[in-house]
Image (cartoon, helix red, strand yellow):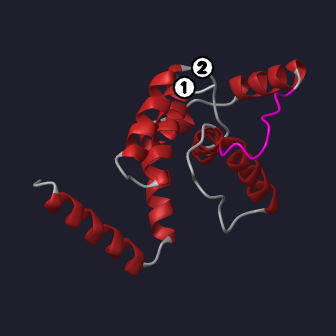
Amino acid sequence: MPEKKTVEKAKRDLRQGKSPTTAAGEFVREEIHHVREGKHGARSTKQAIAIGLSKARRAGVPLKPPKRGSRRTKESAERAYETGQGQRKPRSPSRSRARATRKALKREPHRTASHKAMSRQGKRSAAQRSRASRSAAARKGWRTRRRRGH
């Protein structure tokens, strides 16, 4: 269950007209904090990010499921998206399953959310993007900053 503060921040972002990915970023941030403070671990940095994105979708952030990726990932994201948009009833897993998931995550390492690991993940993701795509994102950021007077 996401924290109230996180949901409020995400809703505020959406009201301000920011993109769904920006709003979802709040949930990812929360998840990284959870791993860092020892609430649970994560097998990889990607897993921690995926948990955050799933929470965002279930909380109603209109974040579309990924176009690429495994069938299982796409289907899971699709279900989370539909739940958040009120098209599907949220099904709570059995208590034993929820407990098993929590225990499994607790056994995972916490170093996956370290500053170093996050940096490595960001660089790896950026490297997979084309130069044109990165350049366009930089230009868009520059325009935003200029508009806001920074």
User: Left or right: 133 with respect to 43?
Assistant: left
Snapshot quadrant of residue 60: top right
Outermost residue toward the bottom in this view: 132
Instruction: Give percent across and percent down for residue 106.
Output: 70, 23
The amino acid type, in three-letter code, at marker 1 is: His
- Disc number for residue 34: 1
Q: Is residue 124 above or below residue 39?
A: below
Task: Report the front residue among 104 and 135.
Answer: 135
Residue at label 2? 39
Check the image and report above or below for 136 versus 144.
below
Residue shown at 77% from the left, 62% from the top: 70
In the picture provided, is 134 more to the left or to the right than 36? left
Q: Which residues are magenta?
A: 85-93
Q: Which mark is residue 132?
A: none
Q: Looking at the image, which residue is at 67% across and 39% down? A: 43
- Along the polypeptide, which appears first: circle 2 or circle 1? 1
Q: Residue at x 65, y 62 (%)?
A: 66
Q: Residue at x 83, y 33 (%)?
A: 91
Quarter the N terminus occupies: top right
Estimate how packed mark 1 is, as few (under 14), some (14 to 19) or many (20 or more) residues with alpha carbons within 10 Å: some
Q: CA distance from mark 2 to mark 1?
A: 5 Å
Name which quarter of the figure residue 59 lies in: top right
Looking at the image, which is closer to me, 41 or 9? 9
Mark 2 near mark 1, Cβ–Cβ under 8 Å? yes
Q: Residues within 10 Å of mark 2 (few under 14, many from 20)?
A: few
Q: Secondary structure at mark 1?
A: helix
